[in-house]
Image: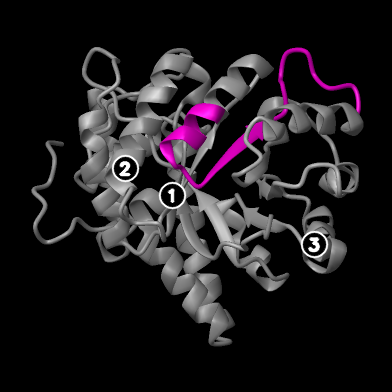
Amino acid sequence: MKIQHLEGLIAAPFTPMDADGALNPDVIPQYYRFLKQNKVTGAFICGSTGEGVSMTTAEKKLVAAAWAACTKEDPAFKVMLLVGGTSLADCVELARHAYSLGLYAVSFTAPSYFKPASVEMLAECCKVVAGAVPGMPFYYYHIPVLTGGNYAMTDLLQAVDGQIPNFAGIKYTHEDFMDFLSCMRYQNGRYDMLWGRDENMLSALAIGAKGAVGSTFNYAAPLYHALIHAFENNDLAAAQALQQQSIDMIRLLGKYGGIATGKAYMKLVGINCGEFRLPVKNMSATDFELFRKDVHALAFDEYKSVQPPSEKAGEL
């Protein structure tokens, strides 16, 4: 398989929920049009931001089908499904479902309960899932802060090289720039390395990253387009200032409880994705008003993602 190296911003979408915490896939077509309006080139669905670990296999199939339906006429928009997880059988089932829907790629992260004892065992897990869909790209999702899978990704590439023909690359959500650079240069840049830390994008650009997957691209894509433009035009001062804006925006996630704050940002840009499921804590109505004021103080309206002209903004 010829490995395509993706470029630009790939969003990690939130999974829309209704007021009762059930899936609300009717929002997804609007969500897709919104991402396209903001020059986002793809969607990494059912990942950390998308609450994949809090969803059943059947629910993930429904979400995948909804994204497939609204993007089927747009092959330039790459949809990747994170298939899991702790059960390799479920991962294989979801991967085959993604292939049947015509999605671009699947991704897999290290089992987090019975953890692979070595990078070689992790490679064996990848082989099982990737082998179920030999006709589509397979990405490993490296996020050791959540999985506990503290393996060097250069070691994983060595273990899979020549063993998994459809191993396309790695979604790299970690801060080890030494390892990331070594992965980018492995086998003369054979594998697609997608950066996954929005707050460190400038550092990743400096060592050659071209594609990135991030949650804040959902609601602040223009900020990152401007950052990339400044970097590519050798305006380091502007790029640093834009990265600081990103950091200030991301710090509000910590102030207001973590990952669920992202859905509050989405309400401010007109896409109501509901709330996160347990065990994630959602902010109260009082905190949302305080959050709204803090966001306004950041001049968020100057760089937020915007609705297509024909779209009607969602309820806040």
Q: Which residue is mark 2?
A: 265
> Can residue 86 be seen at all in this image of the molecule?
no
Which amino acid is tagged 3?
Leu
What's the residue type where badge 2 is placed? Tyr
Say whether residue 81 is left or right of residue 186.
Answer: left
- How dense is the environment of label 3, judged by Cα within 10 Å: few (below 14), some, or many (20 and up)? some
Q: Nearer the viewer, residue 58 or 292?
A: 58
Quarter of the picture holding the C terminus: top left
Residue 273, given in percent of the width and then of the height, sits at 27, 32
Q: Using the image as rendered, state which of residue 236 and residue 120 is in the foreground.
A: 120
Residue 105 lies in quadrant: top right
Counting residues from the start of the chain, the first of labels 2 and 3 encountered is: 3
- Kindly state the secondary structure of the residue where label 2 is placed: helix
Cα separation between marks 3 and 1: 23 Å
Residues rendered magenta in the picture = 96-118
Q: Earlier in the sequence, mark 3 or mark 1?
A: 3
Q: Residues within 10 Å of mark 2 (few under 14, many from 20)?
A: many
Answer whether labels 2 and 1 touch (C-beta < 8 Å): yes
**Amino acid on which the number 1 mark rests in the picture:** Thr
Location of mark 1 (residue): 216
Q: Residue at x 46, y 33 (%)?
A: 100
